[in-house]
Image (cartoon, rainbow, N blue to C red):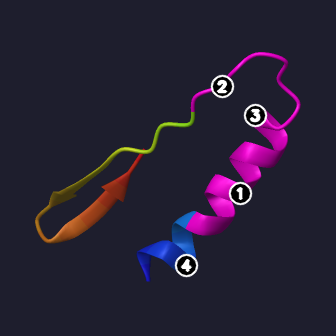
Amino acid sequence: LIKLVLQPIIENAIYHGLKYKESKGLLQVKGFMKAEMQFFR
C-alpha cells in the first residue's frame, strides 16, 4: 500500500522538480512510525 501512495508523489517530484535541472538534484524521502502509524516527509 505504501508503494501505491508514494509512487505518484515521487514521480511528480521528479517530473516537476528534478527532470529539467542542469545540475544534479536530490530527492529525499523520510519515513517513521508512531503509534503504529506511518509518516513520510
In the structure shown, which secondary structural element does the residue marked by tag 1 occupy? Answer: helix
Q: Which residue is mark 3?
A: 18
Residue 35: quadrant of the picture: bottom left
Q: Is residue 32 left or right of residue 13?
A: left
In the structure shown, which secondary structural element does the residue marked by tag 4 occupy? Answer: helix
Residue 7: quadrant of the picture: bottom right
Nearer the N terminus, badge 1 or badge 3?
A: 1
Disc marking residue 27: none
Tag 3: residue type?
Answer: Leu
Residue 20, relative to residue 7: is it above or below? Answer: above
Q: Which residue is mark 2?
A: 25
Nearer the N terminus, badge 1 or badge 2?
A: 1
Separation of disc 1 and disc 2 at Cα?
14 Å
Tag 1: residue type?
Answer: Glu
Separation of disc 1 and disc 3 at Cα?
10 Å
Q: Is residue 35 left or right of residue 1?
A: left
Q: Which residue is mark 4?
A: 4
Q: What's the residue at 18%, 59% (across, down)?
A: 33
Separation of disc 4 and disc 2 at Cα?
24 Å
Other residues around mark 3 within 10 Å, as few (<14) / some (14–19) / many (≥20): some
